Image (cartoon, grey):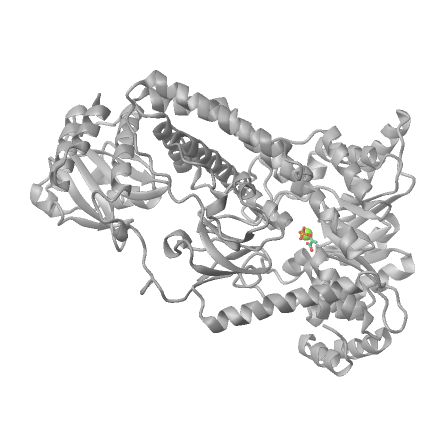
Amino acid sequence: MLLKRLRDTMARAGSVEETLGEVVRMVANEMVAEVCSIYLLRAGEVLELFATQGLNPDAVHRTRLRVGEGLVGDIAAHGRALALDDAQSHPQFAYRPETGEEIYHSLAGVPILRAGRVLGVLVVQNRTRRLYDEEEVETLQTIAMVLAEMAAAGHFVSPNEQQQVDGLGLLPLRIDGVQLTPGVAIGRAVLHEPRIMIQRVVAEDVDQEKVRFQEALAGVRDDVDRMLEATDMQSGEQREILETFRMFVDDRGWRDRVREAIDSGLTAEAGVQRAFDDVRTRMGQSTDPYIRERLSDLQDLTNRLLLRLTGRATTDASAQPDDMIVIARDMGPAELLDYDRARLRGLVLEEGSALSHVAIVARALDIPVVGRAPDVLSRIEAGDAIIVDGDNAQVMVRPAEDVVQSIHEAIAARAARLQRYAALRDLPPVTRNQVRISLNMNAGLLIDVQHLDDTAADGIGLYRTEIPFMVRSEFPDVDSQAWLYSRVLDMADGRPVTFRTLDVGGDKVLPYVGSLGDDNPAMGWRAIRIGLDRPAMLRGQLRALIQGANGRPLSVMFPMIADVGELKGARALLELEMERARRRGQAVPERLRVGVMFEVPALAWQLDSLLPHVDFVSIGTNDLLQFLYAADRGNSRLAGRYDSLSPALLRLLHFVVEKARPAGVDVSVCGEMAGRPVEALALLAIGVRSLSMSPGSIGPVKAMIRSLDLDEVTDFVGSALAQPDQPLRETLRLFAADHAIEI
Ligand code: PEP
Ligand code: MG
């Protein structure tokens, strides 16, 4: 009833003051509160008191709080509700004498939220120290939602004030973000799902609204099924991502939330939005990447439902330019697949992370993505010329003509380079003095494996098995793991694949293992440490690897080994699984190779006891460098501070190579370093003969190898390493220039 009365009040023509004045009176009355106030967000992150029942009327339009200031500012800053029986004792309480609020003790406030953005705050207060219960807070949230629709439509504050402006809106602008996928693209901005305005918030007929919700849900389910059937969905991961997505459609808990919202008097579309806002406020603060990804999936679903319920067509292909750069707050994987692939050039997100589903799909489509680009949606207009530079993690809006020109040149040069590397495809990675180097690629998704053919790599030197685990919502059983490993080996078609067992923990959180809460995750309970403490999990994976190999050669590598005992423990589990397979008459690998990742410096001083137990050592320079220098590999302030071409690292690697050679143990390098030509050059000079890198680096590294005389560079680096401690980067660059080595 209250909602209906609110709607009627808002529909009646009147000034903003009259309308909101009526609203606060009504709410105060309904909630038996002495005070009800509405604060709205104005330009410059200021919350202004727009209407009040109970506080001093003169304070209206005078009382202004910054976002984050006082309790009202706190509600806005965190986008979450507060209910306090003694507001004044709260550390955030800020007293404003003009309001006369000192006599009120209890307070309940909720953010006025629209599409995850705070537009204002709705507050009730009472003299007595009472605690507002959950139901009362929910009622306030529902009212806030009705207000949000009016506010978003610009009824109270002009929409211009709700957007951030960057000086003159037509000047070129550069926005920095983070790289989600590499590459450069130029095109015209398409704003993803320009806000869906909900016109009808209050239900006329609750039962009818439930039917509408049910129908919309069925429609979305059909859409997803159609996508799943689409012929080009060969990749296992893309399928899986869509299936996870469909699980949301069928999730009871979420559907019940929407139904409850409809029961409270909202229309189906308002109910869907309300349920999403609830989840968003609860999960939005989470730093757990998995939870954040689920939130984008749910946003995707919400948008789809809203499109159906508000009768708008899904993405209208005819209105899309031929060179689309899609701009979105965040996006689910299915939404990206809605766009015409032939016209999609790039993607810019306000949120997002490299492991988000949309990024994984974008990588498979080979389009550049820049994420965490602040406020792009309000700073970019549809049709703006945009450059997405994934390589440098930046977005250029309305770039000047000379910038456009140089980007076109860069794109053309990149294409030419790629063509030249493609021409090298069928030539072997042999140095000028006839040393054959083993060039391998790193992979983590089934879709990556196809690059073995484009690059003619010798094999997969590092298969990161954790990635498929991370996109799933539950632990995959042995059979589905075995299916995946078997597909990888089928696609590799006889070329060797080194499977690394699960390297999770740290920032790679598996939802079903639970957040570990380590203070120092990179050095915490991760990788083989989890595997040995949870042997059933590791044994399951080893069993799946044996099963997937089905008699073919198998190569297994254990991550983060810090102590020989850990390798022995892991090997023992592998032996148990081999034994089990034999006992059951299953095929066992015709050749089994076992190795370790060398990522922890302590291993250097255990090589004598380690080497007899392994067939190979693969050096993970990403982690090794971080542990050697005690420098977090993900900390952008430390990026580049410690050079991978420092004598400290190179001497350590040289030591490992020299130890392994007489023991007959192969050494390869699979960290990022292996894929950068000048660094690969140094690695070859200290005796490494096998490298594994991302597929895109194979061409440049092969070009370097084919232009290199290994004897010359070995002598040169040998004497440079004997010199006082200076990074070799510059000296190597000059050496390469003098000797016509392509780096
Ligand atoms: C490494 O540490 O160098 C490595 C290859 O492993 P990851 O990057 O997966 O930690
Ligand atoms: Mg590592």
- Residue shown at 56%/44% (left/top)? 358
**Res 4 → quadrant:** top left
Q: Answer whether residue 539 is visible to the viewer in this image.
A: no
Say left or right for 704 vs 636. right
Residue most extreme to the front: 318
Q: Answer whether residue 702 is visible to the viewer in this image.
A: yes
Residue most extreme to the bottom: 738
Percent coordinates x, y for residue 107 in the rendering: 22, 34
Say left or right for 148 vs 249. left
**Which quadrant is the N terminus positioned in?**
top left
How many numbered discs sit on the rendered protein?
0
Say left or right for 405 vs 129. right
Vertical placement of 561 versus 435: above or below? above
Vertical placement of 243 versus 715: above or below? above
Residue most extreme to the top: 207
Vertical placement of 652 versus 108: above or below? below
Closer to us: 341 or 521: 341
Percent coordinates x, y for residue 13 in the rendering: 14, 36
- Residue shown at 75%/50% (left/top)? 462
- Residue shown at 50%/24% (left/top)? 218
Closer to us: 70 or 248: 248
- Residue shown at 32%/39% (left/top)? 113
**Which quadrant is the C terminus positioned in?**
bottom right
Say left or right for 681 vs 65. right
Percent coordinates x, y for residue 659 in the rendering: 85, 61
Percent coordinates x, y for residue 565 in the rendering: 78, 45
**Res 53 → quadrant:** top left
